[in-house]
Image (spheres, rainbow, N blue to C red):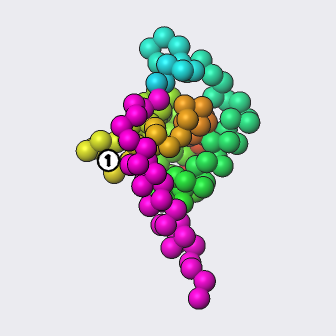
Amino acid sequence: MRPSVLTLTFVAGVALLIARALAGGSPPPDPAVGAGPGGAPTIDLSDPARIRAGKSRFDSTCAAFCHGHAPPLFVGRQDLLPEYAFRMISDGGGSATPMPPWGDVFTTEEIWELVAYLKFLGTQKPE
């Protein structure tokens, strides 16, 4: 019997969480890398290559486990602050949301790629 996609996705998610836990207490990436005054990104969040990389990572990790593809939470949302999105991905949602921290899994650049993709989704019209 072949394992289902859902089973494989679940196992991959658990493996990522275990890898993060085993990585120890390393501090989350500093958004100042690639950020200007006040944490605002100095990198180009509209760069098509960065958006594509963020979409690929989102589809393989975020969409597969929690958010779904082109999630309504982000589509058409133009008020998403890049600094806030970076911190939420890096540090997680704390007790306010079930969003886990990904700062020990993704590099600073990979997190900015995800932020670029989320900002791109914000320019799309909700269906």
Can the viewer see residue 119?
A: no
Q: Residue at x 39, y 31 (%)?
A: 27
Residue 76 lies, with reference to residue 79, above or below; the image says: below
Q: Position of residue 108 (x, y in %)?
A: 54, 31
Q: Position of residue 106 (x, y in %)?
A: 53, 40
Q: Image quadrant for the C terminus?
A: bottom right
Q: Position of residue 43 (x, y in %)?
A: 63, 22
Left or right: residue 13 versus residue 58 is left
Residue 115 lies in the magenta-colored region: no
Residue 85 lies, with reference to residue 121, above or below; the image says: above
Residue 67 lies, with reference to residue 116, above or below; the image says: below
Is disc 1 placed on a helix, strand or loop? Answer: loop
What main secondary structure does the magenta stretch of the protein show?
helix
Q: Residue at x 41, y 48 (%)?
A: 22
Count the marks: 1
Q: Residue furthest top?
A: 37
Span shown in magenta: 1-29
Q: Image quadrant for the N terminus?
A: bottom right
- Which residue position holds label 1? 97
Residue 13 lies in the magenta-colored region: yes
Mark 1 Cα shell of 10 Å, populated few (<14), some (14-19), many (≥20): few
Q: Residue furthest right?
A: 49
Task: Tell me the kind of residue under disc 1.
Answer: Thr
Left or right: residue 4 versus residue 91 is right
